[in-house]
Structures are given as structure tokens and as C-alpha cells.
Image (spheres, rainbow, N blue to C red):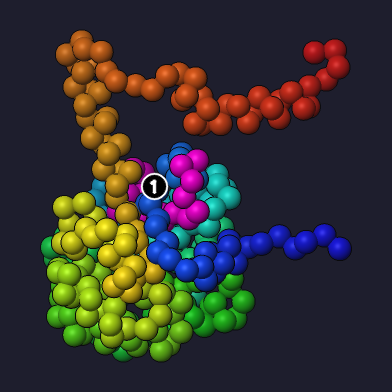
């Protein structure tokens, strides 16, 4: 009997069961996801911030819709074979909406969905103006997602709290503990502001924990060895690729405007990156004898 295909969620569970820190870049479209895989990363995270910026040209303030995130995720997941984590924002409604969101992310090909406790419309965790729902409603959101998973949606649940910014670290830790008790596969306290806060979170909350590492953001950028020793399982860099791509595009536009030679990769390297070599191989396989 042929071996059964491994689902994205099964692939991700295998990665999480390995010893050591899982390092994960952020992606925002199919080509950035392909580049992550080509660089040897075993998983990647579809950032809502980055998708909102690249698809809408708008800030991460709840402007992007469920359908737009789902469509972007479907393109990303179909472009690669590595498991992809998807930003599910607040779940886009009540408990029934959240279950539908989880099921939709499974159908799109995601291995994991991140859900958070912000008031809708939400915003980037490292920007001002955030608000969170009460603890009971936050728990309800994660319970609905866990129920969807337990009812057959083959996906991991990452439960995020932004209560560190709106309340204090103690409230954030208690919410993360609650999310773990409910059954979230991964928990995530957003934007701790010191090494001491990061250490306290890791010490007091069981389960797989995420360090969200944004260049020049609120959380200290520690080495992989330091993060692992502290107790983190996942280190995600959600905005690095978006950041450097905007920086490179701005520089190139400046060069072009001023009639200067802009730095680019070799055209053959560009065609390889987007998949022409694979296409040519398939084209040759199906070429007719008289062509």
C-alpha cells in the first residue's frame, strides 16, 4: 500500500517534536515563500502586517479581510512544500466565525493558524492604540478554534495575547496559561519589553512558546542560543523580508530616477528564483515528437 501523504499540520508537528529552536521567517506572497524554502528554511509564517502592506498598500490595522488573507494564503501554500503558519487576526467574528476561519485556513493549506485577543479591528502588536477583549471572550475564541481542530480540522492553534501592552505582563502570562489549558498547541505573549519579561514568560507558561522578533520593535533581539536556553521553541521574524524588500525597492527607484546603475541580480538567477528551470523541465517532458 502506498504511503499516505503527510499533511501540512503533520509536517509541522514533526518539526516541533524535534529538539532545538525552530527559526521561522515571515513571508507575504508566493515568491517570498519560495525564497524561504529555497534558502533552506523548513517552515514560514504568513504575516498579516506584511500581507496588508504588499496586497493593499495599507497598515496592519484590521483593514484586510478574511477573504483576502485566505486568498493570499492559498497562493503561498500552493507555491511551497514546507508548512506555512497563517495570521488569522481575531478570527473575524464570534465563535462560529472563528470555527469557519480555522476550517478555511485548513482548506487553504495552512499548517497552523494564529488567533489573538485584540478588539476588532486589530493592529500590529508593536504599534500604539491596541485594546484587548476581556479574558472570558479571549478564552472563548481559543476554545472555538480548539473545538474546530478537535472536530477534524487538521491544523495547529497558536494563541496570542496582546495584554502586555494594554494591562501588564501578569495579565498576559495568565492569559497564555489559560490558552494552554484550553488546548492551544502554541502560546504567544506579544511584545515583552525586556529580557527579564521574556524569561518570566518562559518560566511560568508551559507548552511551545513563540518569540516574535521585529527589527527595532519592542522585544529584544536575542541570539538563537539565548532564546532556546530561555525556553522558547519558535523564533519568528515576521517582517524582515518585507523590510529589506521595501528598502531595496526604494534604493533602486532612487537610482533609476537619478539615472544611476541600480544593483540587481543576474537575469539567469532571477529566472531560477521564480521557477523557469522547473518549468522548462516539465515542458521538455511533455514535448511532442515532431516539435
Task: Tell me what residue is drawn at x 58 percent, y 62 percent.
Answer: 11
Q: Quadrant of residue 126?
A: bottom left
Residue 40 x %, y %: 49, 46
* 50 in magenta: yes
Report the side of 88 relative to 12 (left or right): left
Q: Residue 60: in sight, yes or no?
A: yes
Residue 127 x %, y %: 16, 60
Residue at the far top in the pictured view: 259
Where, quadrant-wise, is the N terminus in this rendering?
A: bottom right
Task: Tell me what residue is drawn at x 17 percent, y 57 percent.
Answer: 217
Question: Considering depth in this image, is 102 or 267 the residue closer to the camera?
Answer: 267
Q: Residue 122: in sight, yes or no?
A: no
| Local crowd size for mark 1, using a 10 Å CA cut-off: few (<14), some (14–19), many (≥20) | many
Residue 27 x %, y %: 40, 48
Report the side of 132 relative to 155 (left or right): left
The answer to whether 165 is drawn above or below residue 224 in the figure is: below
What kind of element bears circle 1?
Answer: loop
Question: Considering depth in this image, is 157 or 23 the residue closer to the camera?
Answer: 23
* Magenta segment: 38-57
Report the side of 278 relative to 256 (left or right): right
Task: Tell me what residue is drawn at x 31 percent, y 62 percent.
Answer: 225
Q: Quadrant of residue 278?
A: top right
* 184 in magenta: no
Report the side of 155 relative to 7 (left or right): left
Task: Tell me what residue is drawn at x 78 percent, y 22 percent.
Answer: 287
Residue that carries the numbered disc 1 in the rendered image: 28
Number of numbered discs:
1
Where, quadrant-wise, is the C terminus in this rendering?
A: top right
The answer to whether 285 is drawn above or below residue 198 in the figure is: above
Residue 286 x %, y %: 78, 27
Amino acid at each position: 500500500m502506498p504511503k499516505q501523504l503527510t499533511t501540512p499540520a503533520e509536517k509541522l508537528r514533526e518539526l516541533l517534536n524535534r529538539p532545538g529552536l525552530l527559526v521561522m521567517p515571515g513571508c507575504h506572497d508566493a515568491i517570498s515563500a519560495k525564497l524561504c524554502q529555497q534558502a533552506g528554511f523548513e517552515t514560514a509564517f504568513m504575516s498579516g502586517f506584511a500581507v496588508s502592506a504588499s496586497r493593499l498598500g495599507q497598515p496592519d490595522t484590521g483593514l484586510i479581510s478574511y477573504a483576502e488573507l485566505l486568498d493570499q494564503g492559498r497562493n503561498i501554500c500552493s507555491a511551497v512544500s514546507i508548512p506555512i503558519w497563517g495570521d488569522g487576526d481575531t478570527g473575524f467574528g464570534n465563535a462560529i466565525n472563528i470555527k469557519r476561519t480555522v476550517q478555511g485556513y485548513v482548506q487553504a493549506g495552512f499548517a497552523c493558524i494564529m488567533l489573538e485577543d485584540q478588539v476588532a479591528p486589530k493592529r500590529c502588536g508593536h504599534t500604539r492604540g491596541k485594546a484587548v477583549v476581556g479574558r472570558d471572550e479571549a478564552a472563548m475564541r481559543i476554545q472555538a478554534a480548539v473545538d474546530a481542530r478537535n472536530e477534524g480540522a487538521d491544523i495547529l492553534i497558536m494563541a496570542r495575547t496582546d495584554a502586555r501592552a494594554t494591562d501588564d505582563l501578569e495579565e498576559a502570562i495568565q492569559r497564555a496559561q489559560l490558552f494552554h489549558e484550553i488546548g492551544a498547541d502554541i502560546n504567544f505573549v506579544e511584545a515583552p519589553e525586556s529580557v527579564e519579561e521574556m524569561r518570566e514568560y518562559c518560566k511560568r507558561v508551559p507548552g511551545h512558546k513563540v518569540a516574535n522578533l521585529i527589527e527595532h520593535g519592542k522585544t529584544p533581539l536575542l541570539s538563537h542560543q539565548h532564546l532556546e536556553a530561555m525556553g522558547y521553541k519558535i523564533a519568528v521574524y515576521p517582517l524582515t523580508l518585507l523590510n529589506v524588500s521595501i528598502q531595496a525597492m526604494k534604493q533602486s527607484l532612487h537610482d533609476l530616477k537619478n539615472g544611476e546603475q541600480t544593483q540587481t541580480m543576474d537575469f539567469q538567477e532571477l529566472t531560477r528564483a521564480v521557477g523557469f528551470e522547473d518549468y522548462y523541465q516539465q515542458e521538455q517532458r511533455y514535448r511532442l515528437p515532431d516539435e
